[in-house]
Amino acid sequence: MTTEEIDTVAKAAAAPAGTTGANGPATTRIRTEGGVLNVFSHGILVLWALMVGVPLLWVLWSAFKDSNGILSDPWGLPTSLRWENWANAWNDANMGQYFINTVIVVGGSVIGTMVLGSMAAYVLARFTFPGNRFIYYLFVAGMSFPVFMLVIPLFFVLRDFPGSPLLATYHGLILVYIAYSLPFTVFFMTSFFRTLPNSVAEAAMIDGASHTRTFFQVMLPMAKPGLISIGIFNFLGQWNQYLLPMVLNQQEEKYVLTQGLAMIALQQGYENDWGALMAGMMIAMLPVLVVYAIFQRQVQSGLTAGAIK
Amino acid sequence: MQHGKYRFIAGFLALPLIIYAIFVISPFVQAFQISMTDWSGLVGTAEFIGLDNFQRLWESDDFWNALRHNVYMLAIVPVVTLALGLFFAFMLNVGGKRRKNEVVTGVAGSKFYKFVFFFPQVISIAIVAVIWSNIYNPDPADGMLNSLLGAIGLDGLQNAWLGEKSLALWCISAVMVWGHVGFYVVLFSAAMASIPRDIYEAALLDGANRFHTFFKITLPLLWDTVQTGWVYMGIIALDAFALVQIMSVNNGGPDGATDVMPLRLYQTAFRDSQFGYASAMGIAMLIVTMTFALLTMRFARRERIEF
């Protein structure tokens, strides 16, 4: 043992003595690499936290500055709170319109995805019928199609849709969002419905409930934890969707928030109202931020659920 | 009851299947058809031209240039992202001081770190791109990164970043790493939490230090998750569309230095109206993505360790 290690062992033995007397003998004998490495590792963690946190806080404080201040003194804190940035973003930069468009589209598509996705998943998880596996794998295969490959034919499917074109319409975008969220939703909810016990559904059926009623009044409430995870997953994915609206929603009055922000950032440059752009980004981030702050655990487990099979 | 059961099944499956078939399956099939035509988008004007689009693609310097950039990112971005993710996750879960009876603990405040690190994952890629355009602002006084470097006396490192041909692609790659590390911290943390504590305990009793613990225990037991993460991150590196479109100088510039396959496809289709040719690019992207995923699965496979 080097002197440093002896030193740390001694510290490790001494330090917890005050906290609890029930220290297992094993703990004290274990060698610990002490302070140096901890300072180092903590330092890196703090550094990364700053690298992530500061740019996001920068958006927040810049949302209260004027364009000149943002451009010529990007690190400076606002001297006064320019709330008019938020009004300018909402009205002049049309963020209000984009916000409402986004709420309509995402609201419709999240509800649609959840209802249709769990209906399909329920049937696929709990009923045997010819073609069950085929349909299941048809849905699951969709997770591996690159959206870029589909986007050109999809554009024409919407443009040439029988009846009325679906390009740049709310319902068109909603249907597309639902369709592209179904593979993962069906995959996730199918495995969730499989874990639910049979006995409750059987009891409901014996009591005379129909299949439909059993699903909506018994099984769906039992699937709530899964529905929350996948609901958050779909909400975040659809709220932040960029490529699909870029291609399918090319009319300015129908823009969603991500398109609006990209357009303001791309087109105008220096004569642009940067304060309003920052306030606009805050407006676009706030709903997501609220969801994340409240449902942190579910958001993290929901978004990583796809990677743990 | 049989009759009722099938009616119920059909009723529940019909609408999801119809929507899925119209908007996902049919475009998938059509992509192959369109790629063999010279279609410019007008109804009924597509001529069948066989594999001509693919031949043109094969001979296109622009497309190879874009593909090369995606491959560069594919080589760098997943390695760096996963390495950082593993390192942070290990610190947060296993790297802490030993205290009380717990042999293996994370550093103090690990919940807070996870909350912050994960943040970029929940905000829109468009917002990430706008933020980083400001950070990379080339002006020595106005740019966030440049003025920071100036303030700490590193004027020599000030740069035009996205305007510098040799740097631009790596600047964009750095943003990808920045945005995804937190996802893997959370993912690997969850996987590490499922490793039984007594394995660590045994190793520590045998005198293993943190370095050994990581390479001999944590990494082998996490290998499946790392492999899946690799495929995910690779698919992201083969995309990069939104970042390049919003951040890069002149859409893929300077001088084509940040051009990527999806941007080629997007412009060929929706700016130049060469939908047949662009669809061939889409098929090429499918092939590249699938090849990468299969190769990763094939070569990264190790004997699975049950625990």
Image (cartoon, coloured by chain):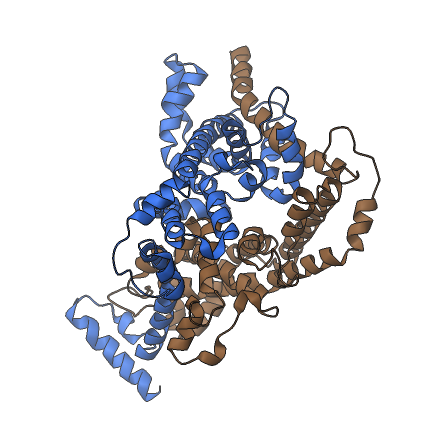
Chain colours: A blue, B brown
Q: Is residue A169 above or below residue A23?
A: above
Determine the residue positioned at 54% across, 13% down. B2
* Viewer-closest of B195 and B129: B129
Determine the residue positioned at 52% across, 65% down. B80
Q: Write down the quadrant of residue B292 in the picture.
A: bottom right
Determine the residue positioned at 66% across, 45% down. B271
User: Which residue reaches farthest front?
Assistant: A271
Q: Is residue B148 above or below residue B63?
A: below
Q: Position of residue B282 (x, y in %)?
A: 69, 45
Q: Position of residue A95 (x, y in %)?
A: 40, 41
- Relative side of A263 to B284, left or right: left
Asked if residue A308 shows in the view, the reply is no
Asked if residue A92 shows in the view, the reply is yes
Q: Is residue A25 above or below residue A200?
A: below
User: Which residue reaches farthest bottom?
Assistant: A3
* Viewer-closest of B77 and A214: B77
